[in-house]
Image (spheres, grey):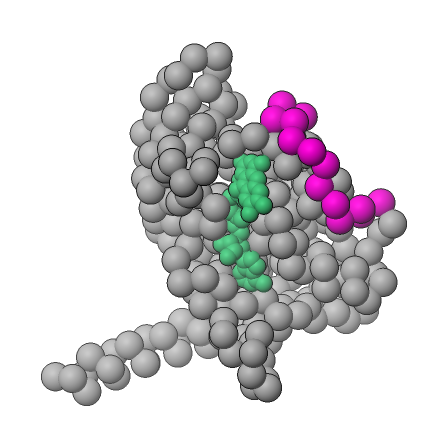
């Protein structure tokens, strides 16, 4: 029996990994914006691979604010919660509160059920660039890629979304090579919740051909406010990047 269990895991995982070698869209980061983007793209028929360097998907959702596991979203983000079957309670002023564990689990389930594939413990280590555009990602196992001299593998994609939050991992790789537009300041501004919420949605962009931004990566790249403890902007930002990629026809 033990050998059958191991064989089932090894064979299934490697089939899944092999299938991820070519995707329509790679989403780097399984936080709120990345999960919403992945779910919407997969629901529209795109082949989507999500990379998450940590063990568990969910990014910053789990901690709520200061470790209090509640998240607050504004009216505009309610349809995203409803799509994923996540419950919320109105708390006044156009705001709603939801359980952060329910949000993390619900968004993850929605992305997987839509057909996106999640590779956890998988670190975006570099980008593939050819002909002036991003054509895929270079990945390695977390704890291997950042500490041991072990070669990575490559996953190709027509579009890559940097949804790595404050780290802006893919954007930083472009910056190191002098490939970023000078408008990218890579420095978040002080907290301003209303301005920050709008910023992460309105400034969603393709920052380099083939590389898109969503969530806090938008603020980190273009100097938007760090925001307040509001997750609605993250959900709307993920939805917007998916819509723009679909419109572009990746
Ligand atoms: C310093 C700090 C300040 C914050 N300030 C605010 C705030 O003001 N308001 C607020 O609402 N929230 C804040 N948060 C919480 C949180 O970052 C965001 O609100 C929210 O979680 C961002 O959503 P996201 O989808 O953009 O990214 P995240 O939730 O951060 O998810 C990004 C995911 O990408 C993964 N990742 C990162 N690098 C890689 C890589 N190289 N390869 C693969 N995966 C990778 C991470 O493990 C993570 O799971 C803050 C967090 C920090 C650490």
Check residue 235 for magenta coloring.
no
In the displayed structure, would residue 21 be above or below residue 214? below
Q: Is residue 242 visible?
A: no
Q: Is residue 216 visible?
A: yes
Residue drawn at the location 32% of the way across and 39% of the way down: 102
Q: Write the start and end of the magenta stretch as one range.
A: 183-198
Residue drawn at the location 36% of the way across and 30% of the way down: 98
- Locate residue 161, reporting x and y percent: 61, 54
- Locate residue 40, reporting x and y percent: 49, 44
Compare residues 189 and 111 and report the one nearer the observer: 189
Q: Quadrant of the N terminus?
A: bottom left
Residue drawn at the location 49% of the way across and 64% of the way down: 53
Residue drawn at the location 40% of the way across and 45% of the way down: 62
In the displayed structure, would residue 128 be above or below residue 164? below
SS majority, magenta: loop
- Locate residue 51, reporting x and y percent: 51, 62
| Quarter-of-image position of residue 85 | top left
């Amino acid at each position: 029996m033990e050998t059958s269990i191991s064989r089932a895991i090894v064979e299934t995982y490697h089939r899944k990994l092999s299938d991820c070698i070519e995707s329509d869209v790679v989403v780097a980061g399984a936080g709120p914006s990345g999960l919403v983007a992945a779910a919407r793209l997969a629901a529209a028929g795109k082949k989507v691979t999500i990379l998450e360097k940590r063990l568990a998907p969910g990014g910053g959702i789990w901690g709520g604010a200061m470790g209090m596991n509640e998240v607050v979203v504004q009216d505009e983000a309610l349809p995203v919660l409803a799509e994923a079957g996540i419950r919320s309670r109105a708390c006044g002023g156009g705001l709603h509160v939801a359980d952060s564990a329910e949000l993390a689990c619900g968004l993850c389930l929605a992305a997987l059920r839509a057909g996106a594939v999640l590779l956890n413990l998988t670190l975006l280590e570099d980008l593939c660039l050819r002909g002036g555009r991003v054509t895929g990602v270079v990945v390695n196992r977390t704890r291997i890629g950042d500490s041991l001299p072990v070669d990575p593998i490559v996953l190709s994609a027509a579009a890559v979304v940097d949804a790595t939050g404050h780290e802006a991992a893919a954007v930083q790789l472009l910056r190191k090579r002098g490939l970023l537009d000078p408008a990218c300041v890579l420095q978040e501004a002080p907290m301003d919740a209303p301005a920050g919420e709008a910023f992460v949605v309105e400034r969603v962009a393709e920052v380099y051909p083939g590389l898109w931004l969503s969530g806090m990566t938008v603020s980190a790249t273009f100097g938007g406010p760090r925001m307040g403890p509001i997750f609605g902007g993250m959900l709307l930002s993920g939805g917007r990047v998916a819509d723009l990629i679909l419109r572009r026809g990746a």
